[in-house]
Amino acid sequence: MASNDEQRSATTILTTAAQSIAARLIANETTAKFTKAEISTTNLFNQSVTELQVLTSLDNVQQTADINTVTVINNNTVNVNVAIDQTKAPNNYQMNSVGLFAVDGDGKEVLYSVTVLKDPVYIHQDAMGSALGIDLETVVGQASNVEISVNPAGAVTNEILKAALADYVKADDSTVVHTADMRKPASDVAGIEEVNTKQDKIGYTPADDSKVAHLSGANNFDTVPTVKNNPLLLASSLPSDLARTGQDANFTAGLKSGGVNVATTADINAVDAKGLARNLIANSGYMVNLDGWQGVQGGILALSTHSFYHNGTGNVIKLINPKTSEAFAFSDWFKVKPNTQYTFQFILFGTANTTSTDVFLIGKGTNVTNIITGYVQSPIKPELITKTFTTGNFEDAYIRVDNNGSKDGNNCYIAFTEVQLEEGTVVHPWTPSYSDVVHRVADNGDGSIRVNGNSYTPADDSKVAHLSGANNFDTVPTVNNNPLLLASSLPSDLARTGQDANFTGKLQQNGQNVALVNNTIARNPDTGRATDTTDFPYKGLTVDGYPIIPLVLVPDRATAITKTAQYPNYAFMYGKELS
């Protein structure tokens, strides 16, 4: 389809023949009656509008569906409900397109519209009488000239119900086996002699009946039995203050969920006493799912983040509308006081092509209270919208939020969150509803629970480690994927830095053997190393018995004579060749 329709799941296109009939209906020149729908497996979603308009029939038609009802939506639009009888399906198939046929006042039947699906719908054979209903919103030009019909075949009569139930035969109570009858007669029970004879033929020692456990009667074990080496619990070892989920429980200490204290009724009443809001709408802000909200009339609800709200970190509810007519979302039912002032508020923004937003309080029956009508939401920022109003004469109600349609036929949406309805005329900051505060833990029905919107699978207490008491693991635990050491795996000859240690093997430092006390050589203080600065006495350093004397260079002969007289143990040299 065209790019504007990329997000639509289904689109209906009027054929050229239908446009001609619609024009004649507007001019009151003819009438029309919808006659049938043909279901096809051909995928036409990527065909252009022009290609669809010129179609006069569909290929690969699997079955013909009846027109169940035709109802008027407005002066130029009707809703055609098509019933696909699955008992007449030739086989299991995928529905990709639907052709709607109509006959004009001259009796000529034409292909009126083609509905193409982005994703196929699976139709399966069902001999039990199942039927799939499809609503086709169809433009006719002048609804008063369209024959409005209700097909009685779409309803279940008493005769059909009786015929269906006739296949289920009521059992004769006298011919069925009851639990009480499930014992063998005495004639089928073996005698002790027969048992002993057969017992002699088996290859194991029979147990003493007085020393084994029995399925019935009392069994008193000497020690606590185990299951796969796991000991069972004694009833006397269970704490007396365990809570039962099916009974009232009074927690005298703290009660928490996810580390956060759970609010009591007294806490909630204390909040009310402080003048804070008592929000009546459940799951109305900081949502993690769409529980308590539904979209109808073609509206698509989605939970999404947006940069307008908490910099894209908080969820908002998007009510997406692919049509130019209204679509709406509604909350769960709640209790209100009749003829009483209430204040409504929510945060709202939307796309620029959204016409406007309405908000209603819908009471049981035909009670409707307009809260906000025709409000044009901002496309560039979120706004806090508030309104005080008076309820009607009803006690049960729900909130309905309307997206009044697209201005240009493209997808549009409004986004809202922090929805609050409270008694009184004062606007308080948003707070969660009583049910959101109290009922934070829910059973998902699949073995897991939901806490604050996150699902967890509770652990079996007998199979987890505890901070106190013994913990026997099947495998060695790890810390950041590094295994811990078993005490039995440590060598028995480890040295302790605070205690004497006797190393029977080598003791080294940086690969060099460490010297032992009894292996060291005492150093003569009169001896020195070549790298030490040492002053040797005259004739204290010799070579082959000859003393080594210092040799000093001087500038001339006179200096050499003078220095020799002063330092007779030195040799002084001079000369040009030495300078």
Image (cartoon, rainbow, N blue to C red):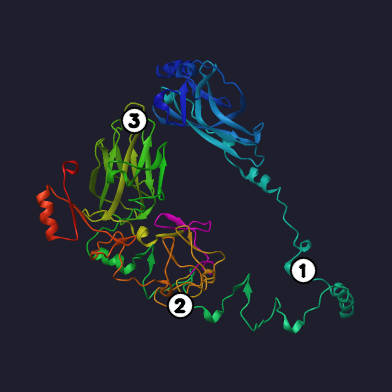
Identify the amino acid type marked 3: Ser
Taking the image as shown, residue 565 lies to the left or right of residue 477, namely: left
Q: Indicate the secondary structure of the residue bearing disc 1.
A: loop
The residue labelled by disc 2 is 241
Q: Magenta stretch containing residue 260, yes or no?
A: no
Q: Is residue 563 visible?
A: yes
Q: Quadrant of the N terminus?
A: top left
Name the image quarter holding residue 323: top left
Q: Marks 3 and 1: CB-CB under 8 Å?
A: no
| In the rendered image, the vertical position of residue 55 relative to residue 69, given as above or below | above
Q: From the viewer's perspective, is residue 242 above or below residue 411? A: below
Q: Where 305 falls versus 322 (above or below)? A: below
User: Could you say where residue 319 lies in the image, as x and y percent from the top left?
Assistant: 36, 39
Residue 339 seen anywhere in this rendered image of the structure: no
Dot 3 corresponds to which residue? Answer: 406
Q: Which residue is mark 1?
A: 182
Check disc 1: other Cα within 10 Å, few if <14, some if 14-19, many if 20+.
Answer: few
Q: Where is residue 244? Give x, y as percent.
A: 48, 71
Identify which residue, 377 or 371, lies in the foreground. Answer: 377
Give amino acid for label 2: Asp
Q: Nearer the viewer, mark 2 or mark 1?
A: 2
User: Where does the magenta region start and end?
Assistant: 443-465
Number of numbered discs overlaid on the protein picture: 3
Q: Residues within 10 Å of mark 3 (few under 14, many from 20)?
A: many
Distance from label 3 to label 1 (Cα)?
Answer: 70 Å
Whichever of labels 3 and 1 marks the residue nearer the N terminus, that label is 1
Q: Residue at x 76, y 64 (%)?
A: 177
| Callout 2 secondary element | loop
